Amino acid sequence: MGKSLVIVESPTKAKTINKYLGKDYVVEASSGHIMDLPKKEIGVDLEDGSFSAELVINPGKEKVVERLKKLAAKSDMVYLAPDPDREGEAIAAHLWLQLAPSVKGKDKMFRVTFNEITKKAVNEAFKHARGLDENLVDAQQTRRILDRIVGYKISPLLWDKVKRGLSAGRVQTVAVRLIVEREKEIKDFNPVEYWTIDAQLDTSREQEFTARFVGIDGKRATVETVSGNALPDQKLTDQVLAQLRKASWSVATVERKERRKNPAAPFTTSKLQMDAARQLGFNVRRSMGVAQRLYEGIELGSEGTVGLITYMRTDSTRVSPDAIVEVRRYVGEKLGTQYLPETPNEYKSKKDAQDAHEAIRPTNVELAPDDIRQFLSDEQYRLYKLIWQRFVASQMVPAIYDQTTVSIAAKADRTYDFRTTGSVIKFDGFLKVYEESKEKKDEDDEALSNKLPQMDDGEALALKELKPEQKFTEPPSRYNEASLVKELEERGIGRPSTYASIINTIQDREYVIKQGGRTGRFIPTEVGTVVTNLLVKNFPYIFDTAYTAKLEEELDDIEDGREKWTDLLSGFYDKFKVELSNAEEHMENIKRMEEPTDEKCPDCGAPLVKKWGKFGSFFACSSYDKKKKGSCTFTKENFEDKPDLQTPEGEAQEEYCENCGRVMVLRSGPWGPFMACPGYSEDPPCKTIRRLNQKQQQKPPQPLDENCPKCGKQLVLRNGQYGEFVSCSGYPDCKYIKQNTIGMTCPKCHEGDLVEKKARRGNIFYGCSNYPKCDFTANHKPVDQKCPECGSPYVMEKVLKSGVYLVCPNRKAGAEEDAPKRRGKKAAAETDSVVCHYQVRIGDAPVIEDKAEEVEAVV
């Protein structure tokens, strides 16, 4: 019997499940997606309404695909086991597409999924191997196409109207819109004055306590927009205080009752992200990165690699019957039967939750956090403990309180009502293990901290002190990561698996910044505000929060087989085309903006105008004329429209490793200080770094299935100053760098290959691989085709707004715009004396890659 091939997406996951399957299985990793839409064109047929997608192998994954094909060809069976969600199903579908021709028979390839990486779950999954779920694949592809259409069609508008380098995205626009609109609420907020009165009272037993004013003659005292009991101004407050000072005080009623507080459901993705932010100070990216490693497996000494939690992307609170039995046994045996409810606690998931996966829970409740702490990093231990405690608490009895509410009457010209509440824990219940975090304290929390003396109905009280306090209503708080996730979830925008990427992208694109360290709050940047306002104004339907949520529901319908994916895309594109056409004609051109102001130029006295430049808006003198020498050139920064970047109270912004989630630390090296992962010197190391003059972290080199042609060592994918590149893992002993050839021999030296290169400014050019021996370069892509007019050994592919053209390198037509710029004195193979007019249009102009980001494009 031959071996079976199992393909997962993660090397760590491969290592974990390999020990459960035995020697008859070979487990390999695809390292994520192997196919996607092409990077330099839209890749979606929008003309005939079919919305067919052109999928290509991702750059750098060719060797991975070839290796998997060879393994599939000699395997008896092939099992595709990426994660159990839409993305995982899409990865499986792409693997199926590539490997099917190599597999021995049509009935030899299967899809397997498991919610947890344990021996029982893995073996059970292989007993129930299935085919591809086409509905899941369609749902993922539909989301991908929606995002590609928005990115590739709207981003060029932003380049043209605002500034180069901006990009547009479907869901992220709405997330930034929430932040921008919240900022406007804060700026437009008008505080309302109100007054509260606290009374310090004494019982006949000389026990003091505090009560708060709530109303007069049984009618509540209220102020508009104020949630609690209050008085509107000092005049009325002084009148009330005058009466209270001569009033007789007594206990009106004492109400004692038992209250129960029920445990919370096990974590869903969003609830985990919120609690990790509030209790641990983890940002969303860090939480999901650490959770991913807990799911894929941790080395636990002699037990080997063990997956500690179930799949961490879910919005269901469902728990398997086996897990319920295990946790109830643990509670009864370890904590006591008094903490065990008679029947298992059940929790309802939210209305539109996908119930494919369980809630997030430990795979083995017997692996208590403190028992395995020695095998976990600090981040892993803290997050695992949070998940473990919440799950165990979810199957425990309620906490029981004795709550006392005392109503107090102060009788003068009228009866002035006061009230105080206190609570005492009678039985801790689930609180023995876990207490849920909250954004703000409520009345129950305050009551727990308030200890009341013994009082009886009608008991006389003595006034010790009155404490009036003037207050003002406060504007709504800016969103932090936890509250933004909560808002997105409540509005139905995005799904749990997308929250981390949404939050990362809007920051990476600098549409928002986070002020105040790890628990900081989001502030929109000037460009984020400008772009969002433009998009919402010109695309009111597509970027409406309700419509975005409706699309998520329709994607769920596709997944469940209730809607055809092409119907959703047709409905979307019909609306989108109308708004796009209108925006192309009417969208305001910010680049040419000259908004009048009331300010005068300090140099010449002319009015100042507000303009837009590379770094945002600024003020300039209206008398400036670039055609006139000596005209006033005064300018000044517009600080009012830019966010305050000062961190309050000097709290430092923490940075987290994008590879493992730990807090980055400052290190010193030969080239100066840099940020590095604390695991930089560990075995195995995490080599993520970021130089202080770079925005993006440089991730550790990723091994590839290809060897160096010079020394035979493994090639790796690295992050460099100008992007990703492939080089030898033996650097610095071997300095081989794999170059991106275009399949053409150099027309000058006829020895080297022409390769694609990137200049310091990021622009692409083409040169000979034998540089510096051969100095041939070209600004446009050479094509191995002889010019029919002058006989030049090659022509060039040139992209203009009007289309794509083949042009001769000797072309001098019109001005110099058609002639390629030369680098060096001998940059081209032809002689400068030849003049040629050859130019042929070969296609429409594609959208430049940078103008349209991938699925996670922003704003």
Image (tube, rainbow, N blue to C red):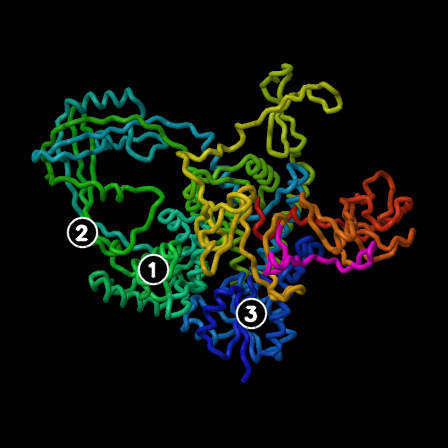
What amino acid type is highlighted by mark number 1?
A: Arg
Q: Nearer the viewer, residue 319 or 109?
A: 109
Helix, strand, or loop for circle 2?
Answer: strand
Q: What residue is disc 2 on?
A: 426
The residue that label 3 is drawn on is 132
Left or right of 429 in this view: 584: right
Residue drawn at point x = 24 percent, y = 62 percent: 341
Q: Residue at x 51, y 54 (%)?
A: 687
Q: Label 3 to label 2, Cα distance in Å?
A: 54 Å
Among the 4 quarters of the image, the one containing residue 239: top left
Quadrant of residue 73 within the rendered picture: bottom right
Observer-nearest of 671 and 394: 671
| Residue 403 locus on image (x, y percent) | 19, 46
From mark 2 to mark 1, how far is it between C-alphas?
32 Å
Q: Which residue is mark 1?
A: 373
Q: Nearer the viewer, residue 803 or 178?
A: 803
Instruction: Give SS at disc 1.
Output: helix
Q: What span is in magenta?
A: 723-751
